[in-house]
Amino acid sequence: MDKIISLCKRRGFIYPGSEIYGGLANTWDYGPLGAQLKKNIKDLWWKTFVEHRLDMVGIDAAILMNPTTWEASGHVASFSDPLMDCKSCKSRERADKLVEKWAHENNSADRPRHWAGEKTPARDLLDFITEKNIKCPLCGKCNWTEPKSFNLMFKTKQGVIEEEGKDIYLRPETAQGIFVNFKNVLETTRKKLPFGIAQIGKAFRNEITPGNFTFRTREFEQMEIEYFFDPDQSPWQEVFEQWKKDSMGFIADVLGINKQALRFRDHEKDELSHYSKGTTDIEYKFPFGWGELCAAGAYRTDYDLKQHEKYSGQKLTYLDPFTNKIFTPHVMEPSFGADRVALAVLLDAYHEEQLEKDETRIVMKFKPQLAPNTIAVLPLVNKLNEQAEKLSLDLIKNYRLEYDTSGSIGKRYRRQDEIGTPFCLTFDYDSLDDNAVTVRQRDSMAQERINISALTTYIDSKLYN
Ligand code: ATP
C-alpha cells in the first residue's frame, strides 16, 4: 500500500487533503491523473448501466434532503457502528473492525458469539476482545469500555442564523435520493417494471476508524442503482443472480480487475441491514486483507418505498398496465463506491518489472480505456516541438493526450509507464520525411513505425479489441 500511496503523490493521482495547512486526517484530494481516472471509471459505469440499457434511467439528486427522509429510511434510528474507548489512552476504535483485523492477522475463523459484523451485540464483542486479548493499536493495552452505538450521519444546520436553523444531514447514501424521486421518474419517463434508476454522487459518513488510504473515508462517492420489480412476475432470487452477474461483469470485464483477486461474499442472516432480505458483496484482495468493493446486490424488498409512503403521505405505488394490479414495487440495489473501485484499479494495475542491468520498471497496467491518458506525444528534441505540438493538437480532439518535452526519451518513457499511458508516440527527425512516428506500447515495450495518417485506425484497433 505504501508504494501506491507514494506513487499517487509523486505522479499526481491522489494527494493528502489540505496539505499546505498540515492536512486534515483521512481526507484525500484527487490530482490531475486521479481525477481523470475516477471520471473514466464513473463514465464507464454510467455507460454500462444507464446509456447502454433500455431499462435504466439516471438522476442527480441533492445531497441535502428533507430530514424526515432519514427518519423514514431508518438511518436516524439504526445507522450506527459499535464505538469502543481505550480506557488507557482514550483512543476510539470500531469494535467489529478490531475483531476482523485480529482474525485476518491470526488467520483465524474464531468470531464473537452472535457475530453479525457491526450489529453484533456489544457484550459479545467485548467478551471476545477481552478473551483474545485484542490490544489497542495505539497504546498496546487491552483495556476497553463496552461498545456504544454511534450514529454515522453528519449533522449540520440549514439557515442563516445558526441557532434558528433546522437540523439537517449530509446524505450517508445516494439511494434515498432515488426513492424520494420514484414517483417523479415514473410519471415523467413512463417506464414499465422492471426498470432501474441510477445515480452517482457524494455521500458522507462520520466513520469511527477511517483509514487504509481511500478505502474508508468520511466523504466518498457512490454509484448506486435501485432496480424496481414485481416479485410476482420476477422472483427476487432471479433478479439477484442477474445483478450479481452484471456487477461482477463490470468490475472484472469492463474495468479489467484481475478475477483471482475478486470474490463474492454473502452476508450472514444476522448481519443483514434492517431493510435487506439478502445481500452479496464483491470483495477485493486489498494488501490489508479482503475488503468490500461493492454490494453486487442487496434485496431491499418494498421497505423503502413503503416507509416513504408512510412518512410523506404520498402514494408510491405502481399500476401494472396489463393486469391493473396496484402494488409497491420491490427493489434490488447494486451499490458501488467510486473511490474504493478506483483504489482497487490502482492496486491491480501496479507492476514492478525487472529489466536488464538491475533496472526496475514501475508500470501501471490500466486497461487502455481506463488509463488517464491514452497517448503521450514525445518530440525527440526541442527542434521538433512545433511539428509534434501540431500533431498533438490534431490527436487531442479524439484522445486523452499528454504532450511531454522534458528529459531524455528513456526518462519520459519511464514516467509514462508509471502513469499507465498505453501509447507513446515519438516524433523524430525521420518523421519530417516519412510522415510517421514510432509508437511504443506500454506493456510489451514493442516499438512500431506507424504513418501519421494511419494512427487513429491503429490506436482504435488496440483500444477497443
Ligand atoms: P463497510 O462495511 O466497508 O463499512 P458498507 O457495507 O457500510 O461498507 P454500503 O453501505 O454497502 O457500505 O455502501 C456501498 C459502497 O459504498 C461500499 O461497497 C463501498 O464501496 C462504498 N463505501 C461505503 N462506505 C465507505 C467509506 N467510508 N469510504 C469509502 N467508500 C465507502
Image (cartoon, grey):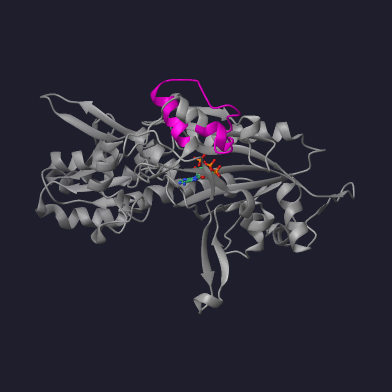
Outermost residue toward the right in this view: 324
Q: Quadrant of the C terminus?
A: top left
Image-based side of 151 in relation to 357, left or right: right
Q: Can you see residue 164?
A: yes
Q: Nearer the viewer, residue 319 or 101?
A: 101
In the image, residue 89 sits, relative to residue 315, either above or below, namely above
In the image, residue 116 sits, relative to residue 164, either above or below, namely above
Q: Position of residue 344 (x, y in %)?
A: 41, 37
Q: Is residue 98 magenta?
A: yes
Q: Position of residue 430 (x, y in %)?
A: 14, 43
Residue sitting at 56 percent across and 43 percent down?
335
Q: Position of residue 206 (x, y in %)?
A: 47, 52
Image-based side of 342 in relation to 24, left or right: right
Image-based side of 219 in relation to 167, left or right: left
Q: Is residue 56 magenta?
A: no
Residue sitting at 62 percent across and 57 percent down?
177
Residue sitting at 38 percent across and 25 percent down?
105
Q: Which residues are magenta?
A: 97-126
Q: Position of residue 150 (x, y in %)?
A: 53, 49
Q: Nearer the viewer, residue 447 or 26?
A: 26
Q: Can you see residue 399?
A: no
Residue sitting at 64 percent across and 52 percent down?
77
Q: Quadrant of the N terminus?
A: top left
